[in-house]
Image (spheres, rainbow, N blue to C red):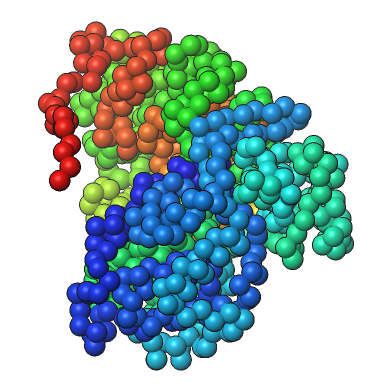
Amino acid sequence: MAADVRNEGARGPADLRLRRGARPATTHPHSPDETSHPLRVAIIGGGPGGLYAAALLKRLDPTREITVWERNAPDETFGFGVVLSDETLGGIEHADLVVYEALQKDFTRWDDIDIVHRGTRQTSGGHGFAALGRKRLLEILHTRCRDLGVDIRFRVEAPDPGRLAESYDLVIAADGVHSTTRETYAHVFHPRVATHRCRYIWLAADFAFDAFRFEIAETEHGVMQLHGYPYAADASTVIVEMREEVWRAAGFEELDEAESIERCAKIFADALGSRPLRSNKSTWTTFRTVVNDRWSHGNVVLLGDAAHTAHFSIGSGTKLAVEDALALAACLEEQPDVPQALAAYEEERKPVVASTQRAARASLEWFENLRLHLDQPPRQFAFNLLTRSRRVTHDNLRLRDARFTEAVEGEFGCPPGTPPMFTPFRLRGLTLRNRVVVSPMDMYSAVDGVPGDFHLVHLGARALGGAGLVMTEMVCVSEEGRITPGCTGLYTGRQADAWKRITDFVHTQAPGTAIGVQLGHSGRKGSTKLMWEGMDEPLPDGNWPLVAASPLPYKPGGQTPRQLSRAQLTDIREQFSAAAWRAARAGFDLLELHCAHGYLLSGFLSPLTNQRTDAYGGSLEKRLRFPLEVLDAVRGVWPDEKPLTVRISATDWAEGGTTAEDAVEIARAFAAHGADAIDVSTGQVVSEERPEFGRSYQTPFADRIRHEAGVPVIAVGAISSWDDVNSLILAGRTDLCALARPHLYDPHWTLHAAAEQGYEGPGITWPAPYRAGSRRPQTGRTDAPKPRLTLGS
């Protein structure tokens, strides 16, 4: 169930393999006595995934003995409607036309999404949904399995999976989110189950919504939301969701099922047209995200919710289970034995599922933090909701519904024909002509801290490439504050002169591009090898002593820093001040204070790296004290008309470290002391971190800081496409986007983004010598003449 279910990926390779490779059922590549072609298959769980796997395997080889154990009766199921994407339906069509045609007869289809908030309804079209009742889906699969000869045993608990594994060639555990099989072999699968902050209840209404409907209710107890969609001509699924604390404050904890349903119907009476709601043994619950390190053990394999779950707000549960079944069947046909087939299945499906789970996590967290966005203009709020999971993007939505997207752009302030990324942004006396930032990237190519020709070419090329702001690498405030011997500095006049050569080039040859300097001190992460020689590895010789908030090495076996004394803190504060003064004389347009990634100032902020018992350790207020002293000193010498930003790690990705809530308070404190924007990164504070990587994975932290602290933000972290930049900015999740690796791949990334979008306005300027390259070069023809006639046999 989701606003973006149709955009969840191209048709999977398993779908196409089954289409090509589904041979006549009377033949198979292995003799019946080979374990490579499982003949006896046990399936635990009779949900859509388990039933579809049974049907596929039986259809591919009618000699198989396939048994499905389902503890419930045939008509007992949780929930009401099921949404399937066009991609999933395509896979079903190619693998089993009988099931596909049966589904087609019962599907309810629609294109629109309605977002209702504060009495205003915004409608976006072109999305394309297909849904049917969950009971009807199971009926279709029951019929198909019976027709093929599958043995389905209702109201029967499956035998122990270990016993089944001994007597069957293959055991498929499709026993759901509370999988007994998964728990039996937890020591092998290594499951991780996370619960989340919202309660929800799955209900139904006896009428059909005319669109996928999201409705927001702001009550005296807090924000509640309705997710609704039709699944039959006279029925709709209705899910009511709210944060745990709102659920408790509203008294739902004390209500029985009937009272809860009646209360929900009253709260969302407008959406329901004052109609009642009904339940199917519905209870309030919290969503559980299931992740497993492994999906198979011997001849036992997990499928569907037993292996993974994805939040209902992107509608992927049934979709993923059906696609698992398709992939598993294909791998069993292709591979020479069961172990290799299960390994191939896991290798194929894991990346797809991980991507979907990242999108689902982004979606569920958006709804958990819905209150942050309530004050956005109506159209921007709707755009934000539609693009929350990153699966639907600005460009994708523009193709689906150009009128709606253009209305959002107009409300945002985009001139006609101007993508959001090319709208200007002002910080103090500096106006950036577009929203693209070349992120700080350490080059480790200086000699004695002096930037040379390499830095001139590196930064100059990216300035010519069209970004609104180009940032230097972390420039160190002292020789002892370097990360490596190849790091640049601003602690001598010679270094300042070398930087002025670079800023002069940018201002002369790339007018309209701003150049910023990032000042920092390595702290306990200093005196290490160049990145390509061994990142964070100590130098074999020539080491210099390290200092930090507390005497804790960054990595086991690394150099232990000295804890800074009060006098040393004063010295370092003055080093930052002196470097800022040199940066101003060198002609930089913006200064950023590096308080992230475990370097010195970051080390004071995190409770994992600051274990001091004096005035600079303990509470967050005390941990902030030294970074704020440095910021005050820098702001005191940095020109008042020039902006100053601060980069922070908004989470340490480690238990007991900086939290998202802490990050908001840190941002507020820096803003109160003169920071004009917060550059929001994460992690690299402790070596034992466990980041949750993914596309634009750090953006939610920037979004939260922007809305809760009320300060402009720079989002960074796996933002790689101009479509992502447009989406994040137009949704109001960030003010600027910083990109690193894309600018290493293509120094002219911003110019090319403009060319690919057909934009030629004031947000970009092609250098005169490059103007002839402002259009994509022609390539040879790759299309063949189309057939003129198709003659039958």
Q: Does residue 789 appear left or right of residue 767 in this picture?
A: left
Question: In the figure, is residue 265 to the left or right of 700?
Answer: right
Residue at position x 37%, y 36% in the image: 720
Whole-percent x, y for residue 482 in the image: 35, 42
Q: Residue furthest front?
A: 793
- Residue 557 percent coordinates (x, y): 36, 65
Q: Quadrant of residue 116?
A: top right
What is the count of numbered marks? Answer: 0
Q: Name the residue located 39 percent from the left edge and 29 percent from the top edge.
A: 722
Residue nearest the observer in this picture, 729 or 452: 729
Residue 521 shows in this picture: no
- The image shows residue 155 at horizontal and vertical percentages of 62, 81
Evaluate whether residue 722 shows in this view.
Answer: yes
Decide: is 750 above or below 198: above
Q: Position of residue 381 (x, y in %)?
A: 63, 30
Considering depth in this image, is 369 or 46 the residue closer to the camera? 46
Query: Considering depth in this image, is 386 or 554 the residue closer to the camera?
Result: 386
Q: Residue at x 48, y 11 (%)?
A: 416
Q: Residue at x 27, y 79 (%)?
A: 37
| Residue 581, quarter of picture | top left
Front residue of 353/322: it is 322
Q: Is residue 415 above or below residue 615?
A: above
